[in-house]
Image (cartoon, rainbow, N blue to C red):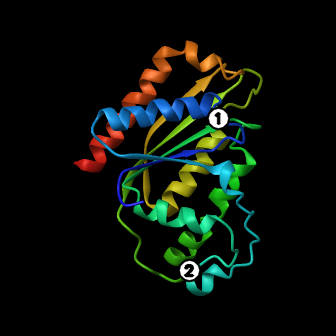
Amino acid sequence: MNGGVLGIAGSPRRHGNSEQLLDACLSGVREAGGEAVKLVVRDYGIQPCEGCHACSEDGECVLRDRMHEIYPMLDGAEAVVVASPLFFATVPAVLKALYDRCQPYWARRYVLKQQPGPKRPGALLVAGGGGDPFGAEGAVLTTRSVFAVLRVEYAHELVVKGVDSPADIGRRTEDLARAGRIGAALAGARSG
């Protein structure tokens, strides 16, 4: 990926509430004249980080899977938006695996003392059902931590609660419109 907005669909289920929020956001990017690419994490079969610290030697992950297709997308994006459902007050395992595999970025910056890339804007879109009393703080903090290592400024957040079935988000027209406005803002920020 060379430029544009990278949209990361972090749900293990396709076409659910969080992915529909992402689609609205990416439509907002395109309507504002920007380019957008959607990455569906579950389709990549990312292995979990093994905590081996090998990336502290050369800044590269030793695990050989499709995460190596995602690193260039992360590097080339001018803006990043992550969409996630809430699973026990945080992101689901498929998205957490991607997050944890960003350890090479941390190693490059803090162990190998390499200069980080340019800062770019980012957003988090969260869809949660009505049953978890702990809210979205875990998902927000985890995402902010990964964004910091990727040099993505946490510029926008949309947390939609009370959406359980995939049809629920379709009735939340203001939330979908807000996701679209976030996309337009990301497109404007990356081109400005």
20 sits to left or right of 154: right
Q: For mark 1, does the 10 Å Cα neighbourhood hold few (<14), some (14 to 19), or many (20 or more) residues?
A: many
Which mark, by number, is residue 59?
2
Does residue 95 appear in the picture of this structure? no
Identity, as a three-letter code, of the amino acid under mark 1? Ala
Q: Residue at x 42, y 22 (%)?
A: 177
Q: Residue at x 74, y 63 (%)?
A: 47
Q: Which residue is mark 1?
A: 136
Q: Residue at x 27, y 39 (%)?
A: 33
Identity, as a three-letter code, of the amino acid under mark 2? Gly
Q: Measured from the top left, where is residue 168 in percent x and y?
A: 64, 17
The kind of secondary structure element at disc 2 is loop
Q: Residue at x 56, y 57 (%)?
A: 146
Eye-nearest disc, 1 or 2: 2
Q: Measured from the top left, where is residue 119 in percent x and y?
A: 36, 59
Q: Measured from the top left, where is residue 98 in percent x and y?
A: 64, 57
